[in-house]
Image (cartoon, helix red, strand yellow):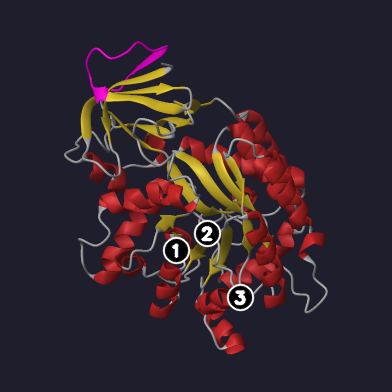
Amino acid sequence: MDLLFRDVTVVNMDAPVLKNVDVGVLGRKICYLAKTGHGPEAVRVIDCKHKVLMPGLYNTHTHGAMTLFRGFAGDLSLEDWLFNNIFPAEAKLTPELIRVGTSLAVAEMIASGTIAFTDMYISMDAVAEVADSAGVLANVSNAVIDFSKEGYVFKNDKIFAQTEKVLSNSTDGRIKADVSIHGVYTSLPYIWEQVMDYTLEKNLNMHVHLSETKTEHENCIKQFGLTPTQVFDKYGVFDVPSTAAHCVWVTDEDIEILKKKNVTVAHNPLSNLKLASGLAPVAKMLEKGLNVSIGTDGMSSNNSHDMFEELKMASLLQKYATGDPTTLPALQALKMATVNGAKAQGRSHESGQIKEGFDADIILIDQNNPRQTMCYCPISNLAYSSSGRDVEMTVCRGKVLYEKGEFKTIDIEKTLHDARKAKEIFLS
């Protein structure tokens, strides 16, 4: 075998914590899991005393290249932030700048334990190229935004060509093309119908923003007499596997629709807090059986890709909202960031768990530090005490992407240099 994690504590999402075990990796697969002893030989053996092995994290809603706008236009309402600041800045973006911003994002993600991300942004083919080179898993899309009251043709949109390009280059399933409608407030129903015809034809996933703000939600009711969820459902947007980001202002009826359509809700707690969008009723969604995953959103509306921050906040917010400290316990928060994310991306048959035959999409957490040395429950420590800084190694499909501060698949010095140069463009 290629890798052997020796004498490690394994935190899986569907089994008790396993202590003093060996985990072996051959090629892209986990091939061995047993009590530490006289296991098979390996090319490389890693001593894992005081360390925890867990599934890699899934960031199921982000706009990766917005790392270029970290700290830009802060402390504004979503509408002011988006229409008056972000959209004008994004007009300066080029495919090369998208590559720079995405590379910066992926570096941050893999260094903090994220092995997969679901991206909705510009130049999705450039995003796919960066993700492919870095060795991560990614579902990429370019959101349709168009206010034309007539004359729009999806197959004449550059998004169509970009999606086709990603589809033609995705041979091993690591990089997937999704289709995206930005939201009910940034395009029109006759456009959605064209997009859905293509999505159904190609059997792809859909990615949307949904009821993120009270203003969006209420304006939709004024315009259509229906909530955003009800409008999208009416036009068949959820007739394919879908991820709906935010869902802060959804009604009980909306939740029933999302459940019936098997829509994944990508919860973005820190972004929703920073933009004061509100608090998504995640506890109710989970109680109804929805698949709820976690995302960071873009770096101008959150400012960190650290998924450990997100999953902790997801748990604490629901405890506060319900007044019940047993709501959304640590293990459930970890599931949202791992197995639920794998399900959202259509990878639950091969990723998101540590078991023989599954892909080696795993991260090694160092607990030999002041924050985690006292550990009575590894699950609790991971959910409430860990941060991305504790990630020692990130492995995706058996390939080591990051280890002890060293990036194996990204030229980090070039990425940082290029990002600093990009800043000059946006300041001009």
Q: Give the magenta-colored segment's residue range.
A: 34-49
Which three-letter amino acid code belongs to the residue tagged 2? Pro
**Residue for badge 1:** 262
Which three-letter amino acid code belongs to the residue tagged 1? Asn
Q: Residues within 10 Å of mark 1 (few under 14, many from 20)?
A: some
**Residue 365 falls in which quadrant of the image?**
top left
Seen in the picture, residue 289 relative to 151 is either above or below; the reply is above
- Separation of residues labelled 1 and 3 (CA atoms): 16 Å
- Give 180 or 47, whichever is nearer the viewer: 180
| View extreme (front): residue | 201
Q: Are marks 3 and 2 in contact (CB under 8 Å)?
A: no
* Image x and y of residue 364, in percent: 37, 31
**Residue for badge 3:** 235
Q: Is residue 339 among the parts visible in the rendering? A: yes
- Separation of residues labelled 1 and 2 (CA atoms): 7 Å
* Image x and y of residue 246, in percent: 48, 65
- Mark 3 lies on a secondary structure that is loop
In reply to whether residue 37 is colored magenta, the answer given is yes
Q: Earlier in the sequence, mark 3 or mark 2?
A: 3
Q: Earlier in the sequence, mark 1 or mark 2?
A: 2
- Mark 1 lies on a secondary structure that is loop
Residue 241, disc: 2
- Separation of residues labelled 3 and 2 (CA atoms): 15 Å
